[in-house]
Amino acid sequence: MNTKSELILDIKNLKVEYRTDDGVVNAVNGLDLEIEKGQTHGLVGETGAGKTTTALSVLDLIQSPPGIIVDGKIKLEGKNIRGLKDKDMESIRGNDVSMIFQDPMTSLNPVMTIEDQIAEVIEYHESGGYKEAIEKTHEMLTMVGLPPRRGKEYPHQFSGGMKQRVVIAMALACRPKLLIADEPTTALDVTIQAQVLTLMKNLKNQYGTSMLMITHDLGIVAEICDKVSVIYAGHIIEHGDLVDIFDNTRHPYTEGLFNSLPNLQDRKAKLIPIKGLMPDPTDLPTGCPFHPRCDYAMDICTKKYPEKRYRNDQHFVECHLYDSDNIKRGGVIKRG
Amino acid sequence: MWKYIGKRIVYLIPVVIGVTFMVFLIMNMAPGDPVKSILGEQASPEAIEELREELGLNDNILIQYKNYFLGLIKGDMGISYKSKVGVAEEIGARLPTTAKLSVIAIAIAISLSIPLGIIAAVKQNTWIDSLTMFVALLGVSVPVFWLGLMLLLFFSLKLGWFPVSGAANWKSFILPGIALGFLSMASIARVTRSSMLEVIRQDYIRTARSKGVPYNTIIRKHALKNALIPTITVAGLQIGTLLGGSVLTETVFGLPGIGRLMIQSIQGRDLPMVLGCIIVFTVAFSIVNLIVDIIYAFVDPRIKSQYT
């Protein structure tokens, strides 16, 4: 196990609710997440699993009302950052931790020039005036592959891929210790996706930034992540490195995710989607929340939430199928 | 940009033609005879006929309109049937009063409504929000003339702070300005609040927050400019309403402005004077609209790029 000092981010037992008129949405339910320094950590799951909510919790950006962090600890480099005063939180945002949002089309202010938007974050966190901030902005633009002379233009004059580059430049402008990327390529064309991913990978190597990569795309995970956590209904149900998750899959849900990918070697093979839908977060099933969709569900699954079972010192799964012996031997499930 | 402005000013011509022609038709169809209202009910038929001929009222309406319009092109707005004074002179003398009233009213409306709307949106669902929106609801519900009368009763008659009638000095414009501005204030505040509420839920506001920008700065720097577009639209339309409202306000407060002149002229079937007033209102409204469109371009670069 890692000692705490090596962790850039340490989330323990995070619980987030959205209290709406239609009921309480249990978005995140006791989530644990540890990100080591310098690593890229993938957070994988379906829409509505709680990925974005987890990310927003770190920066205390959950829309409130209705969202509220009910319980849990969030530590950045060993220091608690949950429940900080606005002013202290503002000095962390964009400086120590910054975030790239899912949709570049809407995440830039339409009535501000892009260089002003990038310079703003530099002005807030670094000494020096507007002029220096603009100079640094131009360096950042060059770095993400945009000509600095276009800095005076507005977001509507850029394409989606270019906007995402602007957002990346903005997020990296103050050399954050942790970069949270919330599906940074989902809204982009495949060709642009590859460019943006390569860019992020290079920048990360250059600065040694730790990264939380939120995605539902296992291809992206395989390409750039070191560690992977699979999230379902606000719980991390399986966690490990790439070899653990891709080659020694244990959780039926993770298995289901792989089975729903098309197999390029055998294009006649049938896709096996996970049956059913994500459970209604206002009314989660008892026990393991995956049991209504699980082919291996047992009696106990409906009653009790499974505990963590470790396959090695990092790879764990939360599933009743395993005990400390059989988890080492092999998966119960045969893949495609 | 200049080309666009020039084009818009040229568009004014068909608007003025259309509006004056409509008024011509309506005044013709309306019951009552201008000649009788000038000479009185006891006038002899010969005198009436003579005056009708003199004023050109026996001609076909299209010919009447043609004659009027040819005069208008030469800058001649005609002579009042009633006072025998030139329409242009009379309007020129009264225009400053209406202009002052409108400027004060819109200044009151805008300077109060936008801060109120922003505060209500930022403090959504608190008592501040409820209070602001209650005042706004009052504003859109209360008729201008009633509010004017109440203000007169209280501040002029009871407290004696302001004159009851007339346009002697700046004090005379305060109460009418408030009465007239209140309605617009309410509408603009409501729109500012709702567009602000929409804007502060946008992704780019979250982006700004993720950069560590303090919330108050975000409201001022990021949200306000985006929220202003609908506000400007409504403010522009409100100036139109305000011109209409000035008719009532001037009547209640006894201000010698164009609105009151128009009412008196309509009652007296004084066609040239009515047309003159209408032209002034039309041109004023069109210019306000043009100014609003120009302001858009300065607020939103996406709109500016369409004006080339």
Image (cartoon, coloured by chain):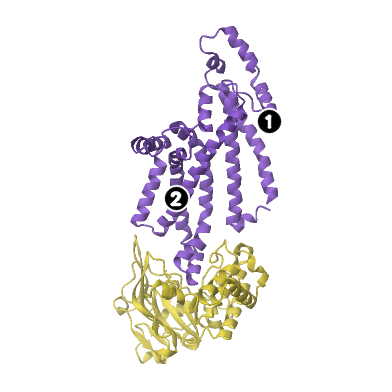
Tell me where residue B241 appears, x and y as whole percent: 50, 39
Say if residue A104 shows up in the picture.
yes
Q: Is residue B1 left or right of residue B135?
A: right
Amino acid type, callout 2: Leu
> What percent of the width, then of the height, locates residue A315?
42, 88
B146 to A45, vertically: above or below: above
Name the amino acid, label 1.
Gly
For disc 1, the chain is B
Chain corresponding to yellow in the figure:
A
- Label 2: few (<14), some or many (≥20) within 10 Å? some
10 Å crowding of disc 1: few (<14), some (14-19), many (20+):
few
Q: Residue at x 58, y 44 (%)?
A: B289
Circle nearer the N terminus (2, 1):
1
Name above or below for residue B66 compared with residue B193.
Answer: above
Above or below, B118 against B139 in this view is: below
- Residue A224 point in image, percent of width and height: 55, 82
Q: Which mark is residue B130?
A: none
Residue name at image x 59 percent, y 71 percent? A166
The circle drawn on residue B112 is: 2
* Left/right of residue A244 with respect to residue A201 in the rendered view: left
